[in-house]
Image (cartoon, helix red, strand yellow):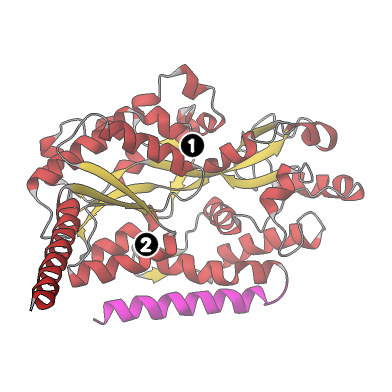
């Protein structure tokens, strides 16, 4: 009898503990801003600093920073929104995904947040980055940065093999072909074109006056202009000026075995960590020194549709975004170009290498985003075949046809729904 009572009491206690635990989990989720992002690299430390700095201001809701790989994040987004379960309060996505997410009806607008905080306006941000999150005159994203793809170079190797070629800050295809024999003789790679090959090809295509979409629903991947761009990069490979297929191109540059490298500005921390590496920044390769473009990504804050997100939470989200805007210098330390103009007058920022890419009106005008409506489909299809085309594993004609068809098929599936 006593034993049964004890068992009964144990059972009651267990239920109480489990109930309290579940309520605690629910309470924590309800009293936090759940923030998803993919800052799993060195830039994650800078975002942590921003999150912790904001949380130290004792907001009504603290931000919970949850990082994951970009592929996992993009897989989860439609699943959680469509189910209505586990939807984060705030998310960072790449600019190329925003038009597609908007058209899929996954995004909530920022009208209330902009009304709540007057600092969240176009005048406080880079216009190109701000406008990329706008549809039908409504803001669906707040920009964090401009992740420009540029040309980095080893100053010592440049002086040895190509003095004065960057006096105009542009490396032309003709100059590359002249450098290759001299560098190759000493076992030095001129330009590992398989690193950010897609962005280099986009730039070379735009220099010819074309893009990879004719209109928002019609891909133009198998065009003569994009074909020429891929052929140009393959020409560098065939001449012996590129790295071998499968090489770690960033490591190649870091170890002083490559003169140039197309790279994202966010790798600045990795490059700065090499004491013996003296490096600089120039524009992406071009056919002509007076016609160049630097393609860029942009990490942007979005709110996924979520009926459970309260107005009180949105007010705190607005405060957090304003805190990030105001403390743009911290994000600049990650190597990125902040979309907020709050750091523009900072001498510390002006001394950072990525500042070159926005240092003049001409440089700002050279920045381009590939934020097409169905750009994500094109990105996936081209990335799948581009290096195989460069290294002769598939013909350029077949590779472009494959990417064109895959993109068309994916677009048609969406349009037919």
Horizontal side of 116 relative to 181 (left or right) equals: left
Residue at figure coordinates x 47%, y 63% from the top left: 212
Q: Residues within 10 Å of mark 2 (few under 14, many from 20)?
A: some
Quadrant housing the N terminus: bottom left
Horizontal relation, residue 51 to residue 87: left or right: right
Residue at the right extreme of this rendering: 185
Q: Disc 1 designates what residue? A: 334
Which residue is drawn at the image coordinates 79% and 54% (left, top)? Answer: 241
Q: Is residue 192 magenta?
A: no
Choose between 186 and 335: the one closer to the eye: 335
Residue at 11% in and 63% down = 16
Residue under circle 2?
A: 73
- Compared to residue 369, the image places residue 47 above or below, namely above
Q: CA distance from mark 1 to mark 2?
A: 21 Å
Residue 128 placement: quadrant: top left
Q: Is residue 176 visible?
A: yes
Residue 405 horizontal/vertical position (percent): 47, 80
On-image quarter of the C terminus: bottom left
Relative to 185, is 59 on the left or the right? left
SS state under label 1:
loop
The residue stretch that appears in magenta: 392-417
Rendering coords of residue 130 (x, y %): 30, 42
Would residue 122 be visible to someone looking at this image?
no
């Amino acid at each position: 009898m006593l034993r049964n009572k004890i068992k009964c009491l144990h059972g009651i206690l267990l239920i109480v503990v489990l109930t309290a635990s579940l309520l605690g989990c629910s309470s924590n989720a309800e009293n936090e801003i759940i923030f998803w992002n993919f800052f799993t690299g060195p830039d994650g430390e800078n975002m942590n600093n921003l999150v912790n700095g904001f949380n130290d201001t004792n907001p009504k809701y603290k931000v919970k920073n949850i990082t994951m790989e970009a592929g996992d994040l993009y897989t989860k987004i439609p699943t959680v929104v469509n189910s209505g379960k586990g939807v984060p309060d705030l998310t960072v996505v790449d600019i190329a995904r925003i038009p597609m997410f908007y058209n899929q009806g996954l995004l909530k607008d920022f009208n209330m947040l902009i009304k709540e905080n007057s600092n969240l306006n176009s005048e406080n941000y880079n216009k190109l980055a701000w406008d990329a999150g706008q549809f039908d005159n409504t803001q669906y994203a707040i920009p964090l940065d401009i992740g420009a793809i540029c040309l980095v170079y080893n100053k010592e190797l440049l002086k040895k093999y190509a003095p004065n070629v960057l006096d105009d800050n542009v490396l032309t295809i003709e100059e590359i072909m002249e450098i290759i024999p001299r560098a190759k003789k000493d076992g030095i790679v001129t330009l590992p074109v398989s690193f950010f090959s897609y962005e280099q090809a986009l730039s070379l295509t735009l220099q010819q006056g074309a893009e990879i979409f004719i209109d928002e629903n019609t891909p133009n991947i198998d065009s003569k202009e994009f074909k020429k761009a891929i052929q140009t990069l393959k020409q560098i490979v065939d001449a012996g000026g590129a790295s071998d297929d499968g090489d770690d191109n960033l490591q190649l540059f870091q170890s002083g075995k490559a003169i140039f490298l197309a790279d994202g500005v966010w790798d600045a921390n990795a490059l700065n960590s090499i004491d013996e590496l003296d490096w600089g920044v120039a524009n992406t390769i071009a056919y002509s020194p007076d016609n160049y473009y630097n393609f860029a990504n942009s990490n942007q804050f979005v709110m996924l549709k979520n009926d459970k997100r309260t107005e009180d939470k949105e007010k705190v989200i607005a405060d957090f975004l304003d805190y990030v805007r105001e403390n743009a210098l911290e994000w600049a330390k990650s190597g990125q170009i902040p979309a907020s103009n709050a750091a523009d007058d900072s001498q510390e920022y002006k001394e950072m290498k990525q500042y070159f890419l926005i240092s003049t009106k001409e440089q700002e005008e050279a920045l381009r985003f590939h934020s097409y409506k169905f750009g994500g489909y094109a990105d996936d299809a081209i990335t799948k075949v581009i290096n195989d085309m460069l290294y002769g594993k598939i013909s350029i004609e077949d590779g472009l046809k494959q990417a064109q068809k895959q993109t068309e098929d994916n677009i048609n599936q969406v349009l037919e729904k």
